[in-house]
Image (spheres, rainbow, N blue to C red):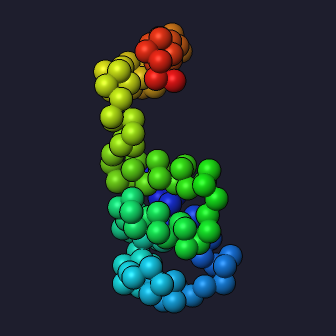
């Protein structure tokens, strides 16, 4: 997966005209390691630290939500709130099959199962 979070965080930092070193210090991170996050060499930080970074950069809430989900995916995880939904987790193999096979019928079945469960 091509890194998305790091470059977006970097762009937000640059738009605020904050140096990498000053920003890393403000969020209590090593500048070298934070540089690796921005370049996509390191995975995004854990949610609490990511939230602190996004708040410091004044990233809009809607964008924060999208970046949290992408951060989980970049770490190789599904978003935690989705994993807490037993009905959704049970139906995920159907989604995976539909995506792998470009199977619109299976994708429609997945969507219908989620709607019927009240999770959507």
State the residue at coordinates (62%, 68%).
58
Residue 103 appearing in the image: no
Q: Is residue 86 above or below residue 110?
A: below
Drawn side of residue 93 relative to residue 112, left or right = left
41 or 18: nearer the eye?
18
Q: Position of residue 28 (x, y in %)?
A: 39, 82
Which residue is pictured at 39% across the width and 63% down the height? 48
Task: Identify the residue at image location x=47%, y=53%.
Answer: 68
Is 108 positioned to the left or the right of 28 in the image? right
Q: Position of residue 75 (x, y in %)?
A: 34, 54
Q: Is residue 93 left or right of residue 37?
A: left
Q: Measured along the vertical axis of the image, is residue 42 above or below residue 106?
A: below
Query: Please, is residue 32 above or below residue 114 in the view?
Result: below
**99 and 83: which is toward the camera:** 83
- Residue, far front: 118
**Where residue 21 sits: x, y (%)?**
48, 89
């Amino acid at each position: 997966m091509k890194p998305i979070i790091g470059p977006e965080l970097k762009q937000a930092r640059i738009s605020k005209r904050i140096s990498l070193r000053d920003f890393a210090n403000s969020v209590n991170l090593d500048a070298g390691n934070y540089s690796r996050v921005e370049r996509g060499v390191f995975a995004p930080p854990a949610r609490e630290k990511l939230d602190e970074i996004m708040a410091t950069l004044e990233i809009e809430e809607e964008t924060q939500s999208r970046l949290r989900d992408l951060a989980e995916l970049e770490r190789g995880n599904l978003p935690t709130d989705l994993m807490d939904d037993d009905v959704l987790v049970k139906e995920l193999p159907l989604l995976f099959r539909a995506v792998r096979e470009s199977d619109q019928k299976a994708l429609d079945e997945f969507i219908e199962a989620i709607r019927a469960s009240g999770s959507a």
